[in-house]
Image (tube, rainbow, N blue to C red):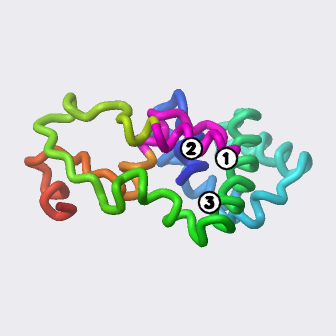
């Protein structure tokens, strides 16, 4: 998800959703151990893949973030153990009345962004981190009249 959220930076989420399976195939099923070992030849191959967003900085960021991910996993035992304190240990349950009430970032995503960047992750600004937190279930920002809001509550 960190790779996909970083790839989405500056683009519509739909663009990345439509390319998700291409990313999965190109990035070895998102295996961080493999991605962390990517070198220049692999990066050039990725940049030539029309099924991906071909941005050199985003490709290099995916490799740097995979390496940082492995460091976090070694230090904390799992990436989950590192992440959940930023949400207070459980999913944040918001009660938004409309999509317009959903912020682009929060103090929690600001803190996560800073912590990830300090550890070497790339393309992890606060807005990207908030989208990540929503996508992985750390934050329930479905509006209250959405069936998913109640299911996730």
Please state which of residues 2 and 109 is positioned toward the viewer in this rendering.
109
The span from disc 1 to disc 2 (Cα, nearest Å) is: 6 Å
Looking at this view, is 124 or 11 the one in front? 124
Reading the image, the residue beneath label 2 is 115
Horizontal side of 78 relative to 47 (left or right) equals left
Q: Dot 1: few (<14), some (14–19), or many (≥20) neighbours within 10 Å?
A: some
Please state the extent of the stretch shown in magenta in the rendering.
111-131
Q: In x, y percent, where is residue 126?
A: 47, 34
Residues under numbered marks 1 and 2 in contact, where contact means CB atoms less than 8 Å apart: yes
Q: Secondary structure at mark 1?
A: loop
**Are there few (<14), some (14-19), or many (20+) residues within 10 Å of tag 2?**
some
- Does 153 sit above or below residue 131? below
Answer whether residue 14 is visible to the viewer in this image.
no
Task: Indicate which disc, 2 or 3, sits on the residue closer to the N terminus.
Answer: 3
Which element is circle 2 on? Answer: helix
Eye-nearest disc, 3 or 1: 1
Q: Is 120 situated above or below 83?
A: above
Callout 3: helix, strand or loop? helix
Q: Where's residue 98, x and y in %? A: 14, 35
Task: Give the residue at x 68% y 49%.
Answer: 65
Mark 3 residue crowding within 10 angstroms, few (<14) / some (14–19) / many (20+)? few
The residue tagged 3 is 24
- Answer with left or right where residue 3 lies relative to residue 150: right
Q: Which residue is mark 1?
A: 119
| Residue at mark 3 to residue at mark 1: CA–CA distance | 24 Å
Q: What residue is rendered at 21% in x and 34% in y?
A: 99
């Amino acid at each position: 998800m960190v790779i996909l959220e970083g790839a989405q930076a500056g683009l519509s989420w739909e663009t990345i959703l439509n390319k998700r399976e291409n990313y999965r195939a190109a990035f070895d099923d998102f295996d961080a151990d493999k991605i962390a070992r990517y070198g220049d030849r692999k990066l050039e191959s990725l940049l030539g893949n029309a099924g991906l967003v071909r941005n050199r900085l985003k490709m290099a960021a995916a490799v740097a973030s995979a390496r940082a991910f492995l460091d976090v996993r070694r230090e904390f035992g799992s990436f989950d153990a590192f992440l959940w304190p930023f949400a207070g240990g459980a999913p944040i349950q918001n009660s938004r009345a409309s999509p317009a009430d959903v912020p682009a970032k929060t103090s929690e995503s600001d803190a996560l962004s800073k912590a990830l960047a300090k550890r070497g992750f790339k393309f992890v600004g606060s807005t990207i981190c908030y989208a990540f937190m929503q996508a992985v279930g750390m934050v329930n920002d479905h509006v209250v009249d959405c069936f998913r809001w109640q299911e996730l509550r």
